[in-house]
Image: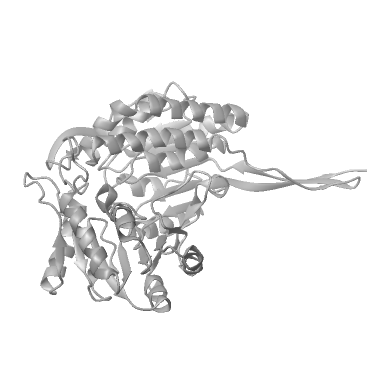
Amino acid sequence: MTIDGKSVPASKTIPVTNPATGAVFAAAPDCSQEQLDAAVDSAKRAFKSWKNTPIEQRQALVRKAGDILIEHAAELSRLFTQEQGRPVDAAFMEIDGAGKWMHAVAEMTPPVEVIEDSDKQFVETRYVPLGVICAIAPWNFPVNLAMWKVAPALIAGNTVVLKPSPFTPLCTLRIGELFRGVFPPGVFNVISGGDELGPMMTSHPGFAKISFTGSSATGKKVMESAARDLKRVTLELGGNDAAIVLPDVDLDEVAQKIFFGAFYNTAQICVATKRLYVHHSIYDALRDRLVAIARQTKVGDGSEQGTVLGPIQNQRQFERVMDLLDDARKTGLTLLTGSDVPDNGGYFVPVTIVDNPPENSRVVQEEAFGPILPMLKFDAVEEVIDRANDSEYGLAGAVWSKDTAKALEIARQIETGTVWINQNLILRPDAPFGGHKHSGLGVENGMEGLLEYMQPQTVYLARG
């Protein structure tokens, strides 16, 4: 681990499993309460000087950290594939992209607003850092989503204790090593551990804010824990994202985009299309195209040449996905599957399209977070908007149509934080990202995301 700029081992370890084989291949430190206390104390000490470091210097160091990610992307991508399962080239894209994301965030400067500047008084509102940030990153995009938290938190003048998922700790621990030469001791700490470490962190009185990405169920527990001492929270949680396909689309043009909008990263994306509503007049044609793509898409070990989709990342999630599939079979739903998957102990699930299931079926109502896509027919636009919005989630959605004015009109009625038109999975460092309803609280990215790591302070100066 990295605590106070130093390498810190742990007396206990947690196993790290390769999801493509189901076999343990490494061990990661299991942080103790005393080591967590040491990390928080170190971050508190560092905060005193880091918050007073000119923002230009903080931005320069975050930019340098981004450079290091880009320089080490090839090395990290192999390790990433072993612990996360995604194919190596896609792993490289995440790590390289995380470095470039840090570059973009490093261009942001919090605003200072002069409210009055007169003979009577000077009134100014500026934004100040919060303190020590508890950053908890998930296993589906372990590097990118960690840097979504780290970069703005550090630029804002906070210090950070970062915890990766116990399923994917290795790349993050290595990044902690690589960043030791960038940030002053205590500014950026990385610890790892099992299921007990998260609650230890969220209940720790030394944190000023918790930034958490994960399931809605766990997010509620995080919020409950944070409430005890009024920690700030940003929660990026689950989604059951609906896409609406109107009858005027060019099926050959959009089928591939819709497929990978649903199944990229083996559908382990909070903003992936998880409910696909298709106008009845083109339903069969689009379904057949998606099934054909699924049958041509290689599912396998991400370290093997030609693999497009890897395994489910961990056994717990694999069992959840298989339970959904078993329920679909038992209730008589029609399952259309893609290519064969390896039978070698890994957590592999075939790409599965569920053919027009009832709206109240589990595969429609629950977020699979795995390669199961229910396709549903609709007749009227007003009806499908209601069906898309009839969810406790509100993270993202998509509309597909050649009539962009009509698509925009529909998009503005979708109750989600992000809506795409004729594209999907596009996020930007300079645009806010957050969820409605049970999909989260607060935002990440953009100036709004940076200000989530700060609080306003208004200064009144009397004159004359």
Q: How is the image coloured?
A: one colour
Residue 78: quadrant of the picture: top left
Q: Residue furthest left?
A: 343
Residue extending farthest right: 464
Q: What is the tally of numbered marks visible in this picture?
A: 0
The answer to whether residue 98 is left or right of residue 307 is: right
Q: Is residue 64 above or below residue 332?
A: above
For residue 10, what is the image quadrant? Answer: top left
Relative horizontal placement of residue 445, taking residue 358 as reference (left or right): right
Relative to 91, say whether 349 is above or below. Answer: below
Residue furthest out toward the top: 181
Q: Nearer the viewer, residue 264 or 409?
A: 409
Q: Quadrant of the N terminus?
A: top left
Q: Position of residue 326 (x, y in %)?
A: 12, 65
Seen in the picture, residue 357 relative to 200 is either above or below; the reply is below
Image-based side of 347 in relation to 385, left or right? left
- Examine the rendering and report whether any part of residue 169 can be seen: no
Judge whether residue 249 can be spotted in this image: yes
Question: Which residue is rendered at x = 47% and y = 69% of the image?
Answer: 410
Q: Residue at x 63, y 29 (%)?
A: 54
Q: Nearer the viewer, residue 366 or 259?
A: 259
Q: Quadrant of the C terminus?
A: top right
Where is residue 455? Give x, y as percent.
Answer: 61, 47
Q: Is residue 284 above or below residue 237?
A: below
**In x, y percent, where is residue 416?**
45, 63
* Residue pictured at 34% horizontal, 36% vertical: 93
Residue 374 location in percent, x, y? 25, 66
